[in-house]
Image (cartoon, helix red, strand yellow):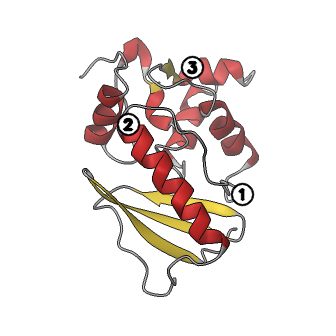
């Protein structure tokens, strides 16, 4: 499991995201209001400070509906092998496009694993940057989301993606 060495707020017009960094990169991103900066983690310095700058630029771009120029290194090692394969596949979904949990399962050659894909999306430690919000339930319905259905709708609207509100 990745040790979180530092944490910092990323202020946005939508509230402050909390970025947490380990030895190998960004290992967690919490939505505004979902977490407080941990008292035990010092602010980023050195390499983590550069990673914070990259994470901030990426979040700012995504919240403007633009693809980021660069991403910080992502440390997704806390996930299982299956979760990591889902998260890698999520990074292939272009900005403004969506797919279903079933489509992701089929891309991974596990056609019966759509619920497991949904669980992996829910466990995504770096939402927005690893775009689990672009994965929809059947019939383009919102489905669940770790940041809450309001955030999923907000992100999809920013990206001008098609979806159906239940």
User: Image point 72% across, 64% down: which residue?
Assistant: 24
Q: Earlier in the sequence, mark 3 or mark 1?
A: 1
User: Image point 53% across, 49% down: which residue?
Assistant: 123
Above or below — where is 158 with respect to 145? above
Percent across and percent down for residue 90 are 60, 32
Q: Nearer the viewer, mark 2 or mark 1?
A: 1
Between the C-alphas of marks 2 and 1, the distance is: 23 Å
In terms of image quadrants, where is residue 12? bottom left
Which one is nearer the viewer's eye here, 122 or 76?
76
In the displayed structure image, the side of residue 51 where residue 14 appears, left or right: left
Q: Earlier in the sequence, mark 2 or mark 1?
A: 1
Percent across and percent down for residue 148 are 31, 44
Between the C-alphas of marks 3 and 1, the distance is: 24 Å
Instruction: Identify the residue position indicated by label 2 in the image.
Output: 144
Above or below — where is 113 with respect to 82? above
In terms of image quadrants, where is residue 77? bottom right
User: Image point 46% across, 28% down: which residue?
Assistant: 134
Q: Residue furthest bottom?
A: 40
In the displayed structure image, the side of residue 128 where residue 22 appears, left or right: right
Can residue 8 be seen here? The reply is yes
* SS state under label 2: loop
Give the quadrant of the C terminus.
Answer: top left
Q: Earlier in the sequence, mark 2 or mark 3?
A: 3
């Amino acid at each position: 499991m990745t040790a979180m060495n530092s944490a910092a707020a990323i202020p946005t017009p939508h509230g402050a995201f909390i970025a947490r960094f380990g030895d190998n990169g960004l290992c967690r991103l919490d939505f505004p209001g979902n977490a407080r900066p941990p008292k035990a983690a010092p602010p980023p310095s050195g390499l983590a400070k550069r990673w914070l700058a990259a994470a901030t630029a990426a979040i700012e771009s995504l919240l403007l509906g633009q693809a980021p120029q660069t991403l910080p290194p992502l440390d997704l090692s806390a996930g299982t092998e299956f979760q990591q394969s889902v998260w890698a596949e999520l990074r292939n979904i272009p900005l403004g496009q969506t797919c279903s949990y079933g489509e992701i399962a089929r891309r991974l050659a596990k056609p019966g694993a759509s619920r497991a894909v949904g669980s992996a999306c829910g466990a995504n430690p770096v939402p927005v940057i690893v775009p689990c919000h672009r994965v929809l339930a059947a019939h383009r319905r919102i489905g669940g989301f770790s940041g809450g259905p309001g955030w999923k709708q907000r992100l999809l609207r920013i990206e001008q993606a098609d979806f159906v509100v239940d």
